[in-house]
Amino acid sequence: MKIKLIPFALCLSVSLAGNAADFSLTSRDIADNRPLTRREVFNGFGCEGENTSPELSWSNAPSGTKSFAVTVYDPDAPTGSGWWHWTVVNLPLSTKSLSSDAGRHLPPGAVQGRTDYGQPGFGGVCPPVGDKPHHYQFTVWALKVEKLPLDAQAGGALVGYMLNANVQGKATITPIYGR
């Protein structure tokens, strides 16, 4: 009789684990497959926008999470390697959101890496004229370490490498933009 209960108990535990809340990212400013606004557009490179990061909020981080990071990446950029618009690492575990234009007032210890525009901070979207709308991946990363050994000169590829080596979970919103 005990042998028959083990598979039942195993199925029950798998079923309950499947009902656990998933790590999620939400925003009042952006949404999947919806066009970004002038607020999130870069001011330069032929674009005229406000270069403002959107509000982001996350919940249900995986067990064992010790810090967070946020990235904005354009896989559609015609570079052969995409385009990094923003990297923020070393956000404390107590951080559950970033307000709009957060790069100007991040928690102590947080680090913004160098974008593909060549400087740290948020670099808004600016796809080439005539391209199909690009997909912008706004991702929050739950990390298994409190701090990554990165500074403001760290480029997107290095940040991405360190994030993937330490990820517990991630959640993404992917809006679009074309011009």
Image: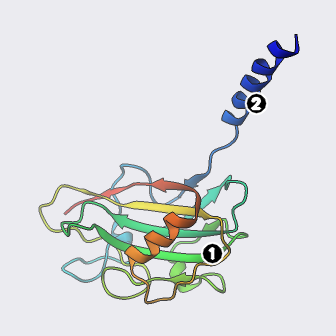
Q: Quadrant of the C terminus?
A: bottom left
Would residue 146 be seen by someone viewing this image from the given angle? yes
Q: Residue furthest right?
A: 1
Residue 102 position in % (x across, y down):
54, 77
For the point 22% across and 60% down, the residue is: 178
Picture residue at 42% right of the left edge, 77% below the top: 158
Q: Of all residues shown, which one is farthest toward the top?
A: 1
Of mark 2 and mark 1, the one earlier in the sequence is 2
Kindly state the secondary structure of the residue where label 1 is placed: strand
Residue beneath disc 1: 91
Q: Nearer the viewer, residue 146 or 91?
A: 146
Determine which quarter of the picture holds residue 78: bottom left
Please tell me in which quadrant of the rendered image residue 169 appears.
bottom right
Its colouring scheme is: rainbow
Crowding around mark 2 (Cα neighbors within 10 Å: few <14, some 14 to 19, many 20+) is: few
Q: Position of residue 142 (x, y in %)?
A: 61, 62
Residue depicted at x 55% and y 76%: 89
- Residue in front for this viewpoint, 145 or 71: 145
Q: Residue 110's x, y, as percent?
A: 60, 82
When the figure is inspected, residue 55 is found, relative to residue 168, above or below; the finding is below
Is 175 rendered above or below residue 147? above
Query: Which disc number belongs to residue 13?
Result: 2
